[in-house]
Amino acid sequence: MNTVVIGILPQEQIRARMLAIARGEYQPKPDEPRIWFTSMKSLAEVLSDDNRALLGVIEEMQPESISSLAEVTGRKPGNLSRTLKTMARYGIVELRREKNHVRPIARATTFRIVVGPVSRLGKSAALPNLTPEH
């Protein structure tokens, strides 16, 4: 499974980047983040130790449904479903509808985090170059 690159920037910088891309003023490089979070805190909530372990179980066991994943992990189906939906919004998990159930599929299990600079006032300066240093 490929490593997914995740970026962290304040919301206004994420928005400015997306608008620059939409206007054709900026072309993202292939190794730049495709998934964005506005803070380390929000990233940590989605990729907590428990949730990364959950991704490992999904990849290893390839459960047929959220219910079967709940049985294997001992997590309550409702809580598990909410967690998976959050991870699906970020593209980390795919929730594939099949017949009469939803099958969770891990789209990523390893991550590289790219953090943009933040000024003393808590806002990024200019749109940072997020290309990794070589």
Image (cartoon, rainbow, N blue to C red):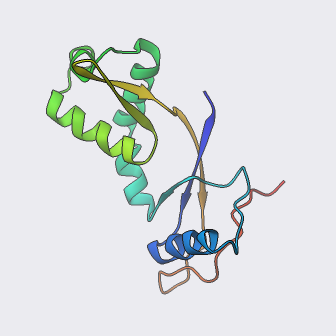
Give the answer, above or below, for where 134 lies relative to 65: below
Between residue 93 and residue 56, name the one nearer to us: 93
Q: Position of residue 133 (x, y in %)?
A: 79, 58
Residue 111 locus on image (x, y percent): 57, 41
Looking at the rendering, which quadrant does residue 63 occupy?
A: top left
Left or right of 37 on screen, residue 84: left
**In the image, is 78 to the left or to the right of 55?**
left
Q: In the picture provided, is 70 more to the left or to the right than 115?
A: left
Residue at 38 percent across and 57 percent down: it is 42
Asked if residue 116 shows in the view, the reply is yes
Above-or-below relation of 13 to 37? below
Q: Residue furthest right?
A: 134
Give the image location of residue 54, x and y in percent: 37, 28
Name the residue at 42% across, 35% down.
93
Name the residue rendered at 47%, 81% in the picture: 122
Which image quadrant for residue 40? bottom left
Q: Residue at x 64, y 76 (%)?
A: 127
Residue 70 appears in the figure: no
Give the total number of marks visible in the rendering. Answer: 0
Seen from the viewer's position, the closer of residues 37 and 118 is: 37
Q: Position of residue 61 (x, y in %)?
A: 40, 12
The picture quadrant where one finds residue 102 is top left
* Picture quarter with the N terminus: top right
